[in-house]
Amino acid sequence: MSLIQVEDIAKSYGRVVAVDGLSLRVEEGSIMGLIGPNGAGKTTAIKIILGLLKPNRGFVRVFDEEPWDNPDIKPKIGVIYERAFFPSRHKVFDYLKRVCRIFGKPESRAREVLALTRLEDAYDRTVKALSAGMLQRFAVAHALIKEPRLIIADEPTSNLDPEARRELLDLILQLHRDENVTFLISSHVLPELSRVCESVAIINKGKVWAAGSLMELSEKLGARTTRISTDNPEALGELIRKLEYVNRVEVDSRGVSVGVLAGEDERLYEDVPRLAKKAEAKIVGIETGTASLEELFRLAVKSGQGEDRR
Amino acid sequence: MRKGRPFLEIFTYALDEDYRFPILEIFAFLFALGTFVFADFAPYGQTEEALAYSLVSTLCGFPLLFIFVFLILKNVAYGLGGDLEKGVMQTLFSYPLKRRYILTAKLLSGLGIAVLLFFGIQIFGLFLLAPDVILTYPSTVFLTYAAQLCSPALLLAGLVLFFTLRLKRGGLAVVIGVVLFLAGLIVSGFVTSIAYGTGSDLSLKIWAVINPNSALQIYYYNMGMVGFAPKTWVPSFSEVLLYLGAGYLVVAALFVVGYAYFDRRLEI
């Protein structure tokens, strides 16, 4: 079941087109990452999904319902923004108790989420007295109070120190594993995203440029990397570069990293022994792996000049 | 989940934000002090009913009115605008409540408490100062307060609500509110001058729709209240009621526009 369905949405601010024909589906029980360069349209897409913005065109459903001004879906969705916004004069525990009452949860839930986010020491502090990192953790606690089925997070690890980032990612994995919570996470910190996300959608110029699991994307985008270890990388690299199905060659002192077009891995494996013989290079090893999220992201930014590769 | 609970929680949150100590106490003190100080400045009237009007309109006139209006601007423009500007509204929108109820909770806190405070103190003061006035002329007292509440208080609140939602900036909306309030005072003087200069009562009638208190004022001046008033147009009592109704319709229309915008158009 798709918890989020977005079909061909568009949103402009005057002449500035923020989202243009974006489509996306987030399945129940999945963790989907949303990546893209600044201004790609990630936050606008998230705001449309949350019912804070109205798309100029397109179809949006969250839990099979229209999100704009719909209180029925609110208890099911937890939201974590890049910058947390809360009434600043309230005390941390008092405010969370109020949120518990709003969602019909026992006040003990406030203590639970404070413990879960390591904010036990901040019970009596006012929200405005929290550091940026603590405020971000408070936002996570606030999102968890209602025990949501879906959490939408826009740059959730910004403002967090490395330890707190690791803890938040662990918490995401724990919630996903133990309570089957679905996540849609937008982030620039790609190694973190690749650690928790089962699938990603790469957004560029307001549309989804590619979406799927890392493996699917690597294959679809031809971003799988074959590493050839050799004693003569320079000469071998020169010959490999001339192959028409190769789109990337990086040479270092120990070997050659090669990116090929989708479905051409086998041809490379066939051609390498022949080229090695010609270059008088001894092949020590050869293996093909999935491209990293950074490589996919770089590809999206570099070659996705508005082109839809889906 | 009980539907009323989220509304009450957001309402009490809004109260906490609008009237944190000692804001409410300071305004209550100013209203109470002003009520008793300015009672002495009420002009005399040749009839008791005109005197009753004179006393009440002096009590809720400038500068107490300005303090009241400023409290409304602080809560509606600065409070609501601040929530929009700082992003707190995004958090409020994550709660299980229709947008219109969130706005109602904010306005009930911002306007409702200010109105209760202002009129509560005034009527209590009036009972102490001149109990005969309230007991003998309750309709005059009620009408005068109703007219003052309509314009400038609620009229300004409706206008500022719309500007606040459009601009999403509390400070700027407060400035616009103060400018509109002062502009209203200036226009009021111009309207009378135009009526005198042209001998036409059209400008007075148009102004009476926006500010029904001006119709009430002319009505009581004609009844014998001491003061300066145009004689080009003297409304009957039923006309005064009509203008008051029209004034409230204008206010209601402004709030309907504000609610419709908040419900259907406001993007954050």
Image: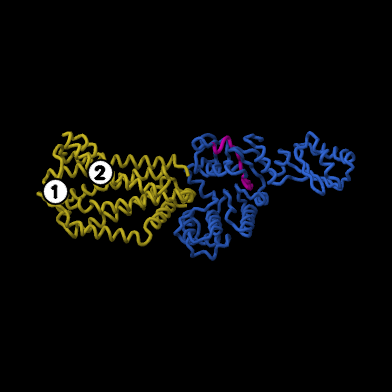
Chain colours: A blue, B yellow
Provide the major secondary structure of the magenta segment.
strand
Residue under label 2: B186
Residue situated in front as seen by the camera: A242 or B110:
A242
The vertical placement of B215 against A167, above or below, is above
Along the horizontal axis of the image, is B122 left or right of A230? left
Residue situated in front as seen by the camera: A182 or B192:
B192
Q: Quarter-wise, where is residue B196 in the image? A: top left
Badge 2 density bin: few <14, some 14–19, many ≥20, Cα 10 Å: few
Both on one chain, marks 2 and 1? yes
Residue under label 1: B50
Mark toward the start of the polypeptide (2 vs 1): 1
Q: Position of residue B249 (x, y in %)?
A: 29, 40
Along the horizontal axis of the image, is B211 left or right of A124? left
Residue B241 magenta? no
Q: Position of residue A207 (x, y in %)?
A: 60, 37
Q: Give the residue type that dot 1 points to.
A: Ala
